[in-house]
Amino acid sequence: MENLSAAFLSLSREERSLLSAIESGMKTHQWVPSFVISEISGLPARKVDFLLGELFEKKLVERESLHYLGYRIDFDAYDLLALSDLVKKGALNAIGERIGVGKESVVYEAFGEMPLALKFHRQGRTSFKHVRRLRDHLSDKSKVPWLYAASLAARHEHQIMEKLCQKVSIPKPVALSRHVLAMEFVSGPSLNRISLSDPGDGLDLILEEVAAALRLGIIHADLSEFNIMVPESGPKIIDWPQAVEINHPHAQELLQRDLANVLSFFKRKYGIEMPVENALQRMGGSERI
Ligand SMILES: Nc1ncnc2c1ncn2[C@@H]1O[C@H](COP(=O)(O)OP(=O)(O)O)[C@@H](O)[C@H]1O
Ligand SMILES: [Mg+2]
């Protein structure tokens, strides 16, 4: 979306309730008929048809002519529904600039009681790798629609962060709606973008955080210099949707890969050599899984 906050502000209450009615209708219809939208929203049919026309113009709904006119919503509308929910929950009162476009997300700066980062998950849209992995968390493994995959990833990331945040240096998770996770804003560059004055100490601090997560039974599984932020207060690890528990069949391998990524970065950039086995020993974690 070109301008998220403008789109959000220009959405009327009725338009929002139609989007939300389509969202509900999509549980049972691939394309939701307008009479169903009218029933769910409680708005009269003619008003609904008019508003749907406007939402279509704004590209917030998609339309398909079957033997009836059916509607569905895409990420843009889900973004707005999640935002309005977060506002309603009191988690959020302003949206700022886009601060990151990652592999599988778009991140905005925002404000609530504290500065926030709003992470809009995009899993289903960008790759099916994580969708496959996320299926492990589903009881019904038959089908994962792409939008559902993004919500699932956000929920998983939120759960993991809730579990870790007391003992591991990560941004504090603040609220969740659908595929959008609000968390504490970390002000500082990522590890790849700075030059550490004491890289040996930096590496130790990072390994301590990996060990702290491991003590809680969690392995990041996508750790690299891009997912470690370095504010003044010391490293914070971000980007947890693919985290696994230590009883995962590939836990050992994933932990070793995480460590290898970090260690090869420190070797490349700072000439610090540490074999993965040494790092594991230092962390006292190898025998844990
Ligand atoms: N809590 C945060 N505070 C500040 N910036 C963040 C925060 N979380 C993410 N970002 C920014 O957004 C980018 C993408 O977020 P990330 O969680 O790594 O998702 P992805 O899976 O898309 O890589 C990060 O590289 C970082 O620049
Ligand atoms: Mg990332």
Image: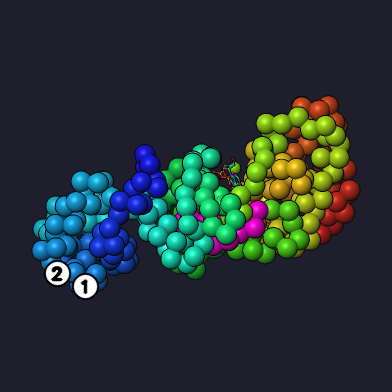
Q: CA distance from mark 1 to mark 2?
A: 7 Å
Between residues 212 and 252, which one lies in front from this camera angle? Answer: 212
Instruction: Say which residue appears at 14% left-offset and 59% top-offset.
Output: 49
Q: Amino acid at mark 2?
A: Pro
Instruction: Say which residue appears at 51% left-offset and 62% top-offset.
Output: 91
Q: Which mark is residue 44?
A: 2
Let me know if residue 132 appears in the view: no
Quarter of the figure with residue 143: bottom left
CB at mark 1 closer than 8 A to ligand 1?
no
Instruction: Say which residue appears at 77% left-offset and 45% top-offset.
Output: 234
Instruction: Say which residue appears at 25% left-offset and 46% top-offset.
Output: 58
Image quarter hosting the C terminus: bottom right
Q: In the picture provided, is 90 more to the left or to the right than 62?
A: right
Magenta-drawn stretch, dominant element (helix, strand or loop): strand
Residue 122 percent location from the top left of the image: 46, 48
Name the quarter showing ligand 1. top right
Q: Which mark is residue 42?
A: 1
Crowd rating for badge 1 (residues with CA inside 10 Å; few <14, some 14–19, many 20+) = few
- Bounds of the magenta span? 171-182
Between residues 74 and 132, which one lies in front from this camera angle? Answer: 74
Q: In the picture provided, is 233 more to the left or to the right than 198?
A: left
Residue 180 percent location from the top left of the image: 48, 55
Between residues 102 and 257, which one lies in front from this camera angle? Answer: 102
Crowd rating for badge 2 (residues with CA inside 10 Å; few <14, some 14–19, many 20+) = few
Task: Name the secondary structure under disc 1.
Answer: loop
Image quarter hosting the N terminus: top left
